[in-house]
């Protein structure tokens, strides 16, 4: 399992992804001093996971979230729900 939380910049995980990786989870940082998490970075890791056939989960937006060039301040209580609303998680691999 690979966990990119807090996700603070674009990351190339492709060299590390393969059938030996159970899943990848990403999420933004919470708290009063939270740094930015950009939705484009989340989508980029999701693309890498799809290409490598690795399950992907977007866990939470974080407190400072950027989407479509706009910055949002998101309360901790709804960060997980907002990530789920994106509907970008991918399913587990089939069992051999």
Image: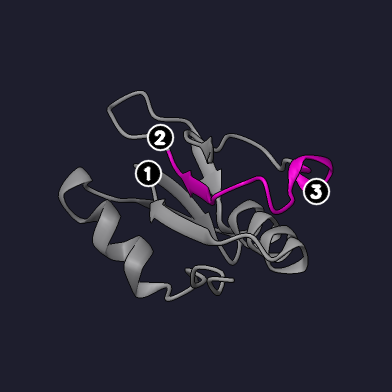
Q: Which mark is residue 29?
A: 2
Residue assigned mark 1 = 62
Tell whether 83 sits left or right of 41.
Answer: left
Would you say the residues marked 1 and 2 are in contact, meaning their CB atoms lie under 8 Å apart?
A: yes
7 shown above or below 83: above
Q: Nearer the viewer, residue 5 or 79?
A: 5
Q: Which mark is residue 77?
A: none
Residue 27: image x %, image y %? 45, 45
Circle nearer the N terminus (3, 2): 3
Residue name at image x 78 percent, y 43 percent: 12
Q: CA distance from mark 1 to mark 2?
A: 4 Å
Badge 1 element = loop
Residue assigned mark 3 = 14
Circle nearer the N terminus (1, 2): 2
* Other residues around mark 1 within 10 Å, as few (<14) / some (14–19) / many (≥20): many
Residue name at image x 21 percent, y 44 percent: 76
Q: CA distance from mark 3 to mark 2?
A: 23 Å
Q: CA distance from mark 1 to mark 3?
A: 24 Å
Residue 10: image x %, image y %? 71, 43
Badge 3 element = helix
Instruction: State which region is magenta.
Output: 12-28
Residue name at image x 45 percent, y 57 percent: 58
* Other residues around mark 2 within 10 Å, as few (<14) / some (14–19) / many (≥20): many
Residue 50: image x %, image y %? 69, 68
Badge 2 element = loop
* Other residues around mark 3 within 10 Å, as few (<14) / some (14–19) / many (≥20): few
17 shown above or below 70: above
* 26 drawn magenta: yes
Would you say the residues marked 1 and 3 are in contact, meaning their CB atoms lie under 8 Å apart?
A: no
């Amino acid at each position: 399992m690979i966990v990119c939380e807090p996700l603070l910049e674009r990351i190339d995980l492709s060299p590390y992804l393969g059938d030996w990786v159970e899943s990848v989870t990403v999420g933004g940082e919470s708290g009063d001093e939270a740094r930015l998490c950009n939705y484009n970075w989340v989508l980029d890791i999701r693309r890498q996971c799809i290409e490598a056939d690795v399950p992907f989960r977007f866990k939470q937006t974080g407190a400072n979230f950027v989407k479509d060039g706009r910055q949002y301040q998101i309360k901790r209580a709804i960060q997980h729900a907002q990530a789920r609303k994106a509907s970008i998680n991918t399913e587990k691999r089939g069992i051999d």
